[in-house]
Amino acid sequence: MTADTWTDGAGRGVWKQRAKQARAVVDVELRKMLGGKRALAVCLLAALPVFVVFLLAVNVHALTLMDARETFGTIYSVVVLGATVFFGCALVFTHLFRGEVLRRSLHFYLLAPLRREVLTLAKYAAGLLAVCTLFGGVTILVHPMFIVTATQGDWVVLEMFRYLGITLLGCTAYGAVFLLFGTLFRNPILPVAVLLGWEMLNFLLPAGIRMASVSYHLKSLLPVPGPVEQAMGVPAELPSPGVAIMSLLILSAVAVVLACLRVRRMEIRYTED
Amino acid sequence: MNEGIVFEDVSRFYGDVLGVNRVDLDLEPGIIGLVGPNGAGKSTLMNLVTGLASPSRGRVVVRGVVPNDAEAFYRRIGYCTQYDAFPVGMTGRRLLISLLRVHGFARDRANELANAALDRVGMTAAADRPVDAYSKGMRQRIKLAQAICHEPEVLVLDEPLNGLDPQARAEVTEIFREFGAVGAHVLISSHILHEVDAISDRVVFLDNGYVIAEGDAPGIKGELKQYPMQIYVRSEHAPSIASRLFELGHVTEVRLHDDGAGLFARTPDADRFFLAFNRLALAGAWHVDAIGTADETVEAIYNYLVVDGAAGVSS
């Protein structure tokens, strides 16, 4: 036995060891993310809401708190969720496995005495840690930045945490879906584009189909109606926050489990890629 | 528990394309050369041994463990692949330590093993430079360090001598011998046939996805009875020896060396040849500097089996 503290069977030592390996994978992944060119693109996406809010904040003054909240709700839906979280997660999570295949470095992981499920979960956790820290931080920054400037003093602290929760939930769900895309498709750009269209236009779809969408559930958690809902009136069939959160968590879990199954059957055939 | 690498009727297809077909092997520990032309199935065989590919049919067992049991299997395996790629933005030392941590080693032990592997492949001085800035030879050596750093029982090496200068080749082959000497399996695929010959205990010849011969070189050559054995003689009396050798009925060809100080002779019966040659040498008072078989080498057998197209030999 070469690696320390392994024990046979399903004893605690095995799980402790798997946790240690997962931490090592997270550590490696975070280093790679920080060192890669994609980090710059993800940081630019994270800076986008700050830039937009800054531009609006210097031009919009003396709004009522209600108007400021509605305006921020629109900025949040379109810029933070629609651009930063969606595209940021696409950049990070589709690349977790696909990037390694393109770089021909996936075999380093696959040759380690590491269950593929642990590898997949650890990579997902690393991606989640990165985007949640970055985009969660942006959410915490831009909410007071806009509300305080636009209302010249008012601030709704609890609402900020609600937006933070939506951001984290959005990262969790989009991250899981994009992780799966990265294991399913040689070129994930097309499915990402299809998902973007689906997410943007799903308000046009019948209620039953509309449920199969991340944005549909995220919208129901917004403190104020999103821009589409403001224009069209809030659809009565938006799920309750509890149902929306559970749905998104179940969707994320299913996507991660499917990704685990895909990675479990993955073979190294770089020449075909 | 079987300590060998066992292929039980293993086939691997990539769609309609054959990788390897009906491979039955039981490889004992030691240094095993894997030889064949491009597309023969060497990389497929190595990917099957290391679990990076699964058989379409049959099964592979490495030292009693199957690849599906990743946690037990990959503690035993070290694979130096042909892929000249590394995780982005890492130094050589960071790469090894990170991989050892992923293996499950504690930080101190990972540092210790990484330093030992770097020292063994002569990369200590360059260990803290980014891998992306390494030369071809350095990348080859850091790949080898990655393969051996966790002290595997089975070392699989795909063209491990590529890009190495002669001194580095000698150092690296010495590492293979050290692994072979302590009872590890060292499976080497290389196009440099004389080096495979020099370090391998046994050789597996592959062609078009089939194992066409397996065993030690003299044993395989002994099975190739349809090919007369080639014998070399170095002597200042080479021209007169040549004329006398033609008198032996079983000698089919005699060819003088370019310098005139030696000859090649072909015979289907080497034992009779050596017996007759001894008699002739004594009678003629020839001074013979050297005599031996010229084609019990991996390169000669490769030419017989692959270039000339013989098949179905096993010893």
Image: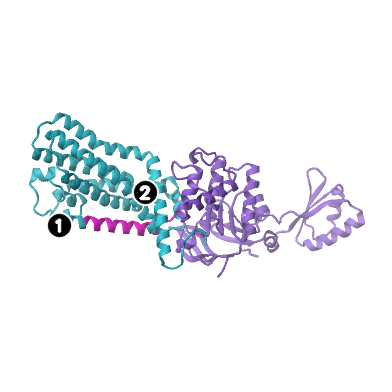
Compare marks 2 and 1 and give the one earlier in the sequence.
2
Q: Crowding at label 2, few (<14), some or many (≥20) Cα neighbours within 10 Å?
A: many
The residue to which callout 1 is attached is A208
Tell me the tag on residue A96.
Answer: 2
Helix, strand or loop status at disc 1: helix
Rendered image quadrant of residue A263: bottom left
Specify the segment rendered in magenta. A247-269
Location of residue A68 in the rendering, given as x and y in whole percent from the top left corner:
12, 38
Q: Nearer the viewer, residue B292 or A252?
A: A252
- Mark 2, secondary structure of its residue: helix
Side (left or right) of A21 relative to B254: left
How busy is the neighbourhood of tag 1: few (under 14 within 10 Å), some, or many (20 plus)? few
Q: Residue visible at 41% across and 56% down?
A: A20
In this orientation, which residue lies closer to the viewer: B105 or B220?
A: B105
Type of the residue with mark 1: Gly
Query: What's the chain of the residue with tag 2?
Result: A
Residue flagged by tag 2: what amino acid is it?
Leu
Image-quadrant location for residue B56: bottom left
User: Which color was chain A given?
Assistant: cyan
Task: Look at the image and tell me in which quarter the N terminus of chain B lies.
Answer: bottom right
A54 to A196, vertically: above or below = above
Q: Is residue B249 visible?
A: no
Q: Is residue A152 magenta?
A: no
Closer to the camera in the image, A170 or A139: A139
Q: Residue at x 35, y 55 (%)?
A: A121
Give the residue at x 65% y 65%: B315
Residue A267 is inside the magenta segment: yes
* Position in image of residue A41 (x %, y %): 32, 38
Please identify which colour was used for chain B in the image: purple
